[in-house]
Amino acid sequence: MYYSAHYSSPAGGITIVSDGMNLSGLWLDGQKYFYGTLKEEPTENDNIPVLQSAKDWLDRYFAGMKPGISKLPLAPAGSEFRQEVWKILCEIPYGSVMTYGEIAERLAVKKGLSRMSAQAVGGAVGHNPISIVIPCHRVVGSDGSLTGYAGGIEKKEALLRLEGVDLSRYHWPKKGRQ
């Protein structure tokens, strides 16, 4: 069984989901793949302790306090490959970015492969069910584009700006605003 709570943030409304013990999802309103990893619709219940902890974490994050990811029990549902990608996302420091290609290179080395597809990494990043906490917004294109954020490029840019990333080196994707 899943439980949900709503949170109002400077980036817009957020739905937080828990299995009762762990954080299972965190989606911005209108985000692609909303509830995509859940096996059933959550029941709204603001009294679940982990949901309250997630709200406190978000309060600290949006106040610029750099809360640690380890402060929340995370249980995102996904394949082994996606889990590996999400683990790397958790290692990207606050206020920093990494490219899809850099993540692919890290995975290739870890698996003893000569190369790994950055596009496959992009698919895993895009399906991250715990946005912001698992910081998929910190991943950019190798050409410096702010591409591929399921919550929307405007929100990705706002989150990076909040973290103090110098956005003068980055640009919107040529395909237009998503």
Image: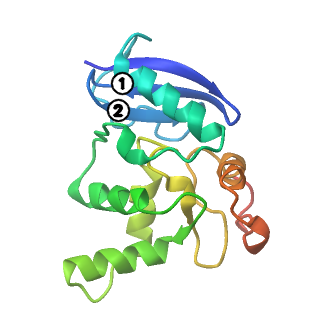
Residue at the (56%, 54%) spot, across then down = 137
- Residue 86 sits in quarter: bottom left
User: Which residue ends up furthest to the front in the rendered image?
Assistant: 65
Image position of 21 with respect to 146: above or below: above
Q: Residues within 10 Å of mark 2 (few under 14, many from 20)?
A: many
**Do the numbered discs 1 and 2 sit on residues whose CB atoms are within 8 Å?**
yes
Can I make out residue 175 in this image? yes
Residue holding disc 1: 50
**Mark toward the viewer: 1 or 2:** 1
Q: Where residue 66 sits in the image (x, y, percent)?
A: 56, 48
- Which quadrant is home to the N terminus? top left
Residue 64, quarter of the rendered image: top right
* Image position of 176 with respect to 169: above or below: above
| Rendered residue at 21%/56% (across/down) | 80
> Residue 75 at x, y = what percent?
28, 39
Q: Is residue 140 left or right of residue 165?
A: left
Label 1 Cα crowd, 10 Å radius (few <14 / some 14-19 / many 20+): many
Give the farthest residue toward the right. Answer: 168
Residue that carries the numbered disc 2 in the rendered image = 23
Residue 36 location (% of width, % of height): 39, 36
Image quarter of residue 70: top left
Q: Amino acid at mark 1?
A: Val
